[in-house]
Amino acid sequence: MEESSRKVHITTFRLSSGTVAELVDLIIRPGNLADILRAADGFCSYDIVDIGDGRITSMSVWTSPVAAEAVRTPVAHWMRDNLVDRAEMTDMAIGPLALHVEP
């Protein structure tokens, strides 16, 4: 099996205030994280999973490690400015996409 060049960032957060729905509303509000991601070269997808107990996991997929690294600073700034009172990062993993299945 050929290894994919796509890069995946998976991050888990614990909410310290608000709800998952409120966080999602913030992320998709114009000018916020969703727009930053969409504007980035090499962006493939972004998903949030409510894993219960006040925790969420986010997953972003990029065409290459270079594309993923290029957006790191704007995303970090957005997180610093918008999540400081809402969520705490508890885990992060980065690696190549090993399998992708579509219908």
Image (tube, helix red, strand yellow):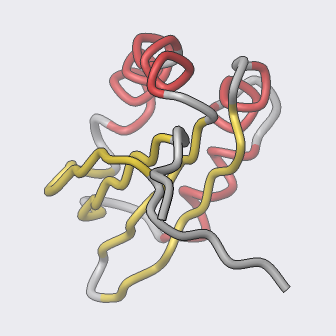
Nearer to me, 53 or 22: 53
Give residue 12's quadrant in the image. Answer: bottom left
Q: Residue furthest left?
A: 90
Question: Where in the figure is residue 23, as x and y percent of width and height?
Answer: 54, 56
Say above or below: 95 vs 59. above
Identify the residue at horizontal 60%, vertical 61% (top origin): 47
Residue at point 54%, 29% (across, down): 64
Q: Residue at x 39, y 66 (%)?
A: 57
x%, y% of residue 67? Answer: 56, 20
Q: Quadrant of the C terminus?
A: bottom right
Q: How many discs mark residues in the rendered view?
A: 0
At 45% from the left edge and 51% from the top edge, which residue is drawn?
3
State left or right for residue 68 relative to residue 21.
left
Name the one closer to the observer, 95 or 85: 95
Q: For this rendering, which residue is in front, 50 or 94?
A: 94
Q: Is residue 41 above or below residue 68?
A: above
Percent position (x, y) of residue 54? Answer: 30, 77
Where 62 falls versus 16 (above or below)? above
Where 81 sits versus 85, above or below? above
Is 4 on the left or on the right of 18, as rendered? right
Which residue is the extreme one toward the front?
A: 1
User: Is residue 22 left or right of 83 when viewed as pictured?
Assistant: right
Q: Nearer the viewer, residue 14 or 96?
A: 96
